[in-house]
Image: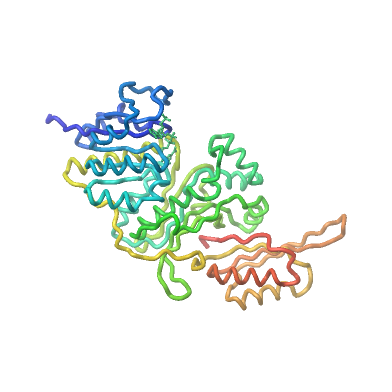
Amino acid sequence: MTELRTLKVALLGCGNVGAQVARILIDDADTLASRTGARLELSGIAVRNLEARRDVELPHELFTNDAEALVKDADLVIELMGGIEPARSLILTAIRHGASVVTGNKALLAQDGPTLYEEADKAGVQLSYEAAVAGAIPILRPIRDSLSGDRITRVLGIVNGTTNFILDQMDTTGAQFADALAEAQRLGYAEADPTADVEGLDAAAKAAILASLSFHTRFALEDVYCEGISSVTAADIAAAKDAGFVIKLLAIAEKLTDPEGNEGVSVRVHPTLLPREHPLAAVHGAFNAVFIEAENAGELMFYGQGAGGTPTASAVLGDLVSAARRIVLGGPGRTETTTGHVPALPIDAAITSYYIGLDVADQPGVLARIAQLFAEHGVSIEIMRQTIHRDSASKSESAELRIVTHRASEAALAATVEAVKGLDVINSVTSVLRVEGV
Ligand code: NAP
């Protein structure tokens, strides 16, 4: 048998994901060599603390504090340190020294992806990041490669396991947000500081990446409208459930024409009502899923574990083998194309259905007045349900009105809600949530 060439692999970081990547590189070396056509030799692992205990037993001599030297002497670099610096500088050094790079660092890609992609293109090396969106789920390569002969029209993703776990807990147990968050923290699904997850920032970084690949245009984090789940109440969830919906935090990227006729892409993250029969409604616990609509392929759904050391390592290794194969075959392929040039539309241009909860006076003619006001603003009502609450102690009555609209623009909806608030028969607007999948 001919001797296989050896490619040096530098690993930056040996935490949850890095340790599993190192384990697989060592344990599955022969399999990886047969799949790649080259031996992938782990040349070193850069960490902060050389003495720290690792999840996996690894040869001590592989560890180093000198990430820079390691990177300069590698054919392939895997960045699993996280954060912006020194990850960014080390990736740039790797690229400029001709190494292809695999990373799972969505925060860095969302903040400064374009610089990295341009440098990789200039150097003729590959920059891959399957692990950055939805952990183990192969989603970026299907979008970039398998669907490259089609036109994607819409992407809906549950791309943050922590928030999906919290909303699922609220839906199945009736818990309030704070209690569901505490449970997520107890089980290790949420960090001590859960801000990046619950405020939608992690999902927004992934939305920017999904939108960029789906619409062949670079979208940055500031193009993504972002609303988290911290204001979703148990009452919102119960009312949604009652009306046949489930609330999910969705990352949405879709092609739209705004009211002035401008074509663009709306990229947004917000709590969204989905009909309970929608495939994404069946994504429970900390699982992730991405639902894609394409002109020719139709509807596709990708489902799996969105985080965790070993599942995420699977995505990293897939990227590594792919990058190594290209070195073996000679020359990298294009990592992505950015010839789409579609503008990112502001949230006002988003067109969707809405769920509106109102606390109203129980008087004759109220429903007709509200319906007329919606019609005057060009927002048509699909479902209107009234529930009367009788308090036997005080002998008082109040009415709760739940409205689901047909698709309307954010701008029209916002104007309608403002006008509704001004009606003397309205006690309060209890919720306004967007609905997808109807
Ligand atoms: P982690 O457990 O915090 O591990 C980070 C590793 O990087 C540690 O080994 C740390 O060294 C090393 N490191 C950090 N800063 C360093 C520096 N300045 N110099 C040298 N080494 C440094 O992180 P992780 O959970 O494995 O995540 C890694 C990346 O994958 C992140 O970008 C994350 O967003 C992404 N990702 C993670 C998951 C997941 O499920 N965890 C899923 C998808 C994507 P010490 O150990 O010595 O401190």
Residue 142 falls left or right of residue 15: left
Residue 86's spot in the image, x, y percent? 37, 39
In the displayed structure, 113 sits above or below 94; it is below
In the displayed structure, 1 sits above or below 405; it is above
How many numbered circles are shown? 0
Residue 250's spot in the image, x, y percent? 50, 54
Residue 89's spot in the image, x, y percent? 33, 42
Q: Residue at x 37, y 33 (%)?
A: 13
Residue 178 falls left or right of residue 118: right
Q: Residue furthest left?
A: 2
The quarter of the picture where residue 15 lies is: top left
245 or 288, nearer to the observer: 288
In the displayed structure, 422 sits above or below 56; it is below
Q: Residue at x 55, y 45 (%)?
A: 195
The quarter of the picture where residue 219 lies is: bottom left
Q: Residue at x 42, y 72 (%)?
A: 262
Q: Quadrant of ligand 1?
A: top left
Residue 301 falls left or right of residue 96: right
Asked which colour scheme the image uses, the reply is: rainbow
Residue 154's spot in the image, x, y percent? 42, 60
Indicate the quadrant containing the N terminus: top left, top right, bottom left or bottom right: top left
Q: Residue at x 51, y 56 (%)?
A: 226
